[in-house]
Image: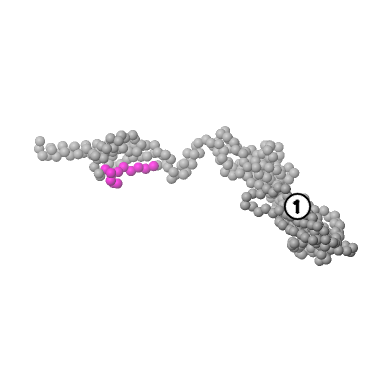
Amino acid sequence: MSSEEKFLLKSSKNSFYHYHSFTEYSGALPGLPTSYAALQRIKKSSPSSLYGSRTRPRYSSPSLGTLSVSSPSWRGAPQHYYSPINLYHPSDAFKQDESVDYGPVFMQEPDDIIFPTDSDEKKVALNCEARGNPIPNYRWLRNGTEIDLESDYRYSLIDGAFIISNPSEAKDSGHYQCLAANTFGSILSREVVLQFAYLGNFSGRTRSAVSVREGQGVVLLCSPPPHSPEIIYSWIFNEFPSFVAEDSRRFISQETGNLYISKVQASDVGSYICLVKNTVTNARVLSPPTPLTLRDDGVMGEYEPKIEVHFPFTVTAAKGTTVKMECFALGKSSCFLCH
């Protein structure tokens, strides 16, 4: 054999050797079963250049969820292997999630609403939104009973929102819940309250004068008008804006609105007007005046204290909130105030 033929044969063997090594290396790619012995053969027989960055096959994870393994030095069609969803493509993941059927999940639940009766807005909207596949349908309950949307022309349903036109306290106040359902289940929202904010007027009837001895305790009644929700009480002495200042002798109950004076003095004589303010609408109304006078048949002697404002039997409060409890006593010898 000539030297030229030997060289050609050697080159042919080397080419076969390299091709064979590539074939064995491709068998060790992720996703294909490869025995431990095969891995050892690859380490022993493959040149170190096969593990370099230039000749190493490159892997890609397209959003379609496959891995394409190809190299310019390889011949033949690229091979494809299954891989999980690419987490760096949230839009594709969302599309795949939407292709899966599941029951409703709330995105928005309704909230408590206080609707001012004198508002220019003549609609109340109780919002509700749920996600699911198929798309959920909505129903609403009032005080535990399903609302028939066809029963009142004022009712309408826009997506999941329940709309009441020209709301009325007598017809519409109460506890509401949103029910979202599809073929895979149903969910019921938290219970919310729809109430109406208003403040009526005091009775225009003239109030009788209250006459006491000097040193005697007295209670002036506020008798507030109809209202919703809470109101704030204060008292005007003689004329606006002279307000009664609370101290060790004088106390205004925020439960009843009554004014308590433990030991009346000559400086207390005058006219008292109860002022109430709605906490939502800020509307204010004034009571008719209540005159306070001193009797001329002597000074009140000492008498034992009498508690006029008592602690409630039970107070329910959320953790971390402030609780105010009222207690007030009338008496000439002693008086205490705690709140």
Its colouring scheme is one colour
Nearer to us in this view, 243 or 7 = 243
In the image, which residues are magenta? Answer: 50-61
The verdict on residue 56 being magenta is yes
Could you tell me which residue is drawn at 55 percent across and 36 percent down?
103
- The residue that label 1 is drawn on is 310
Which residue is nearer to you in this view: 197 or 297?
Answer: 297
- Image coordinates of residue 263 in percent, x first then y, are 80, 62
For label 1, the SS is loop
Position of 213 relative to 146 (above/below): below
Q: Quadrant of the C terminus?
A: bottom right
Name the residue: 71% across, 37% down.
151
Q: Which image quarter: residue 187?
A: top right
Q: Position of residue 73 (x, y in %)?
A: 27, 41
Farthest bottom residue in view = 267
Tell me: residue 55, above or below residue 209.
above
Q: Is residue 301 left or right of residue 172?
A: right
Quarter containing the N terminus: top left
Residue drawn at point x = 30 percent, y = 43 percent: 56
The x, y position of residue 49, in whole percent, is 25, 44
The residue shown at (25%, 44%) is 48
Residue 57 visible? The answer is yes
Horizontal placement of 207 versus 247: left or right? right
Q: How many marks?
A: 1
Hey, what amino acid is under mark 1? His
Residue 316 x %, y %: 68, 48
Q: Residues within 10 Å of mark 1 (few under 14, many from 20)?
A: few
| Residue 122 seen in the figure | no
Which residue occupies the extreme left position in the image? 2
